Amino acid sequence: AASLAQVYRARLASDGRQIVLKVRRPGIRRTVEADLRLLTRLAEIVDAEMPDLRRYRLREVARQFTVSLRRELDFAAECRNAERVAANLAAHPEIVVPRVHWQWTGERLNAQDFVDGIPGKDLAAVDAAGLDRKLLARRGAGAVLKMILEDGFFHADPHPGNVFYLPGNRIAFIDFGMVGRLTETRRFEVVALLHGLATSDEEMVAKVLLDWRDGKEPSDADPARLRAEIGAFVDQYHGVPLGQLDLAALLSDLMRILRDHGLALPPDLALLVKTFITLEGMGRQLDPDFDMAAEAEPWLRKALIAQHSPAVLARRGRRALRSMLELMAGLPQDLHELLRSARRGQLQLRVDVPPLERFGRQIDRAASRLTIGIVTAALIIGSAIVISVDPDSGLSRFGILGFAGAVAGGVWLLISIWRSGRQ
C-alpha cells in the first residue's frame, strides 16, 4: 500500500509466472488535483507578497512538480518510462528493470514481472545473503549517474522502497512514475558544475552559476566575490567521505551563496536535486565510507569528453546552421513587414522605465489623497455653515451627514498615509 496505489502479487494463467499488479486508488486524482491547486495558489501568493523570494521562481517550480505528479498518476506512462530506462541500461546486466505486460496495462493499472529480491531497507538480509554492500553502492550510484549524465532521463525517486538487491550483487529498480528529464544544454551545464565541485574548479562552478542567473530580474552578482565564495565552498566539501558529508548543509550553503548573489537554480533542476538527496541517503546506508565525488568523477570526465566529441559538435553545428538559414530565409519578409508598418505610421517604439512607472504611481496616490483632503475640508466647512445658519431646520441633518463623510474621508487619509509609510 502506498500513497497513489496498491500493489498485489498475481500469477499469469498461461505459464504461472509471478507478476505484480499496481492499481491506482479510486478518487486519488481528485485529491491530488486539489492539492496541486492549493500548491499553485500558495506559490502565487508568495510570489506576489514576498518580492525577495521571486528569484526562486516558485511558480515555475510548482508547475514542474504538477507536470511530474500528473505523469505519475498515469501508470501506462510509468511503464513507458521503465522500458526507456531498461533500453538505456541494456548494456549493464547488473541493473534490472522489470518487464512490462502491456496486455494488462493501462492508465489505472499496470502489470510487471515480480522482483524476488531483498528490499532496499533490509540491510541485515543483504549481509546475511553475502552481498557486497560497497559494490552495491558503487553500482547503484553508477546507474543513476549514467541516467543523469549520459541519457538525460533518470529515475527521480530512487529511495530504498523502489530498490531491490538480487543475487550476484545486482540491483533492480521499480516504480518509474517520477522521472526527470534534462536537455542536452542543461545536462552539459550540470556536468560542468559537478565536475567543478569534484575537481575544486571554482572558476567552472562560478561560470555555470552566473549562466543560471535569472533573466527576468537584474542580478547583483559580483563575479570576483562569487568566485571567492565558491572557492571556499568547494574546498570545504571536496574529498569528504559520504558518511561524513551533510548533504543538507551542503545544499543550504549553496542556496545561501545563490541568494546572496541574486542567483537561483533553474526550476527544471528541482527533481535532480531531489534525486541526489535520495541517492545520498541510500549510499550512506550501504557504505558510510563511500566517496560520491570520487565515484562521480569518471562519469563526469566521460560526459565532458562526449560533449566535445566530433559527432556532438557536428550536431550542434548543423542546428546552428539550420537556425541561421531559417533566419536568413525569413529576413526579407520581416524587413518588408517592418517597412510597410513604418510607411503606414503603425510602427511603435515602447520604452519601459520601471523607476518612472513607480514615480507615476506615487504621484497618482498623492493626487488621490490631495483630492480626498480637499473634499473632506469642503465637507467640514459646508456642514458647519449649514448647521450655523439654522440649527433647528431640516438642513442640519445634511450638515451631520457632511460631518460623517468628513470623518470617513479623514480616516481613509490616515490609513493611507500609515500604510504608505510602512511600505
Image: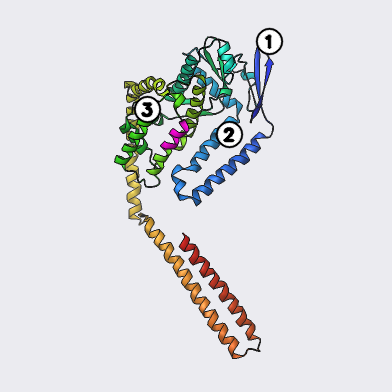
Give the CA distance from mark 1 to mark 2: 34 Å
**2 vs 3, front mark:** 3
Residue 192 higher or lower than 11, as above or below: below
Left or right: 83 in relation to 331: right
| Residue that badge 3 annotates | 238
Residue 414, labelled with which disc? none
Q: Is disc 3 placed on a helix, strand or loop?
A: loop
Task: Identify the main secondary structure in magenta.
Answer: helix
Q: Read off the magenta span.
A: 246-254
Q: Amino acid at mark 2?
A: Arg
Residue depicted at 59% across the width and 90% down the height:
389
Asked if labels 1 and 3 touch by Cβ distance under 8 angstroms, the answer is no
Residue 70, labelled with which disc? 2
Q: Is disc 2 placed on a helix, strand or loop?
A: helix
Residue 368 position in % (x across, y down): 48, 69
- Which quadrant is home to the N terminus? top right
